[in-house]
């Protein structure tokens, strides 16, 4: 299940969203194309990624190359590979523009960074003794998803489903798409050993909750449930017509 677009793109140019995408891609290319081998890459992640044990004080920072509290910010702009980067940037591209439009450019940037820090701290609370570095923008983007769910629960999101060799796109309300995504993060967090690397599920879940909390004042200022009534729970922009494929359908032979 892959979200590929929403039906109500932003009413203004999302400069911050574009800049965040560019920054993530630029930073990734800067180290991915220049570090000589996996050992150097691992050392880079141990230096600039969040190490929960260091942040929690369980591992003395002097015994590691880690930069400590600074990594709460730097880790947001690092990714472990092309798929990691591409998936995160796709989600930011889909959901970031309407949140930026609603918050304004500067406020959205602060929200994004605060959500990413909150996500990292959630992972620290869940695994305070872990020495596995955490990298990725997904915690900050999870905050964007949480805010989007609060502001626009009935927005239509086109989701690509792949059934072996069948590819179908279905428009699904955001509350279902994001609710299922959040549930999967909780499931993964409860079922993944804390000493095992891989997906930082608790950072995702924590970022999502942080996004809802950080967006709550804006939602209340807009009228709370009354905002949903006025907008039907969708971004206050006209829906863009979905262009159907021009590829002709070939009837099956009987």
Image (cartoon, grey):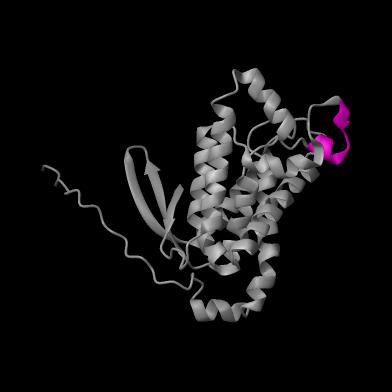
Q: Is residue 123 above or below residue 183?
A: above
In-image side of 164 versus 30 (left or right)? left
How many numbered markers are drawn?
0
- The x, y position of residue 221, in whole percent, is 66, 77
In-image side of 104 versus 173 (left or right)? right
The magenta segment: 52-62
Residues 216 and 63: in front is 63
Residue shown at 66% from the left, 76% from the top? 220
Query: Residue furthest toward the left?
Result: 254
Res. 231 in view: yes
Residue shown at 77% from the left, 35% from the top? 51
Is 60 inside the magenta-drawn segment?
Answer: yes
In-image side of 228 versus 135 (left or right)? left
- Which quarter of the figure has residue 77? top right
- Magenta stretch, overall SS: helix
- The x, y position of residue 150, in whole percent, is 60, 66
- The x, y position of residue 181, in whole percent, is 56, 51
């Amino acid at each position: 299940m892959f979200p590929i677009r929403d039906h109500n793109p932003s009413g203004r140019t999302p400069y911050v969203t574009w800049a965040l995408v560019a920054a993530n891609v630029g930073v990734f290319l800067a180290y991915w194309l220049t570090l000589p081998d996996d050992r150097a890459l691992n050392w880079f992640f141990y230096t600039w990624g969040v190490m929960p044990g260091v942040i929690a004080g369980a591992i003395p920072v002097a015994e590691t190359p880690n930069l400590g509290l600074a990594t709460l910010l730097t880790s947001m702009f690092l990714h472990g590979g092309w798929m990691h980067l591409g998936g995160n940037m796709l989600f930011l591209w889909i959901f970031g523009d309407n949140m930026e439009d609603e918050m304004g450019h500067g406020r959205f940037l602060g929200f994004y960074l605060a959500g990413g820090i909150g996500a990292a701290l959630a992972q620290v609370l869940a695994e305070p003794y872990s020495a596995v570095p955490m990298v990725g923008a997904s915690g900050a983007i999870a905050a964007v998803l949480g805010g989007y769910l609060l502001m626009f629960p009935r927005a239509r999101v086109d989701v690509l489903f792949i059934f072996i060799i069948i590819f179908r796109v279905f428009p699904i309300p955001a509350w279902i798409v994001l609710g299922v995504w959040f549930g999967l993060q909780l499931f993964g967090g409860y079922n993944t050993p804390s000493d095992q690397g891989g997906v930082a599920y608790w950072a995702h879940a924590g970022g999502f909750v942080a996004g809802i909390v950080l967006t709550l004042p804006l939602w209340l200022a807009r009228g709370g449930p009354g905002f949903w009534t006025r907008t039907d729970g969708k971004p206050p922009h006209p829906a863009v017509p979905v262009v159907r494929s021009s590829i002709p359908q070939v009837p099956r032979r009987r």
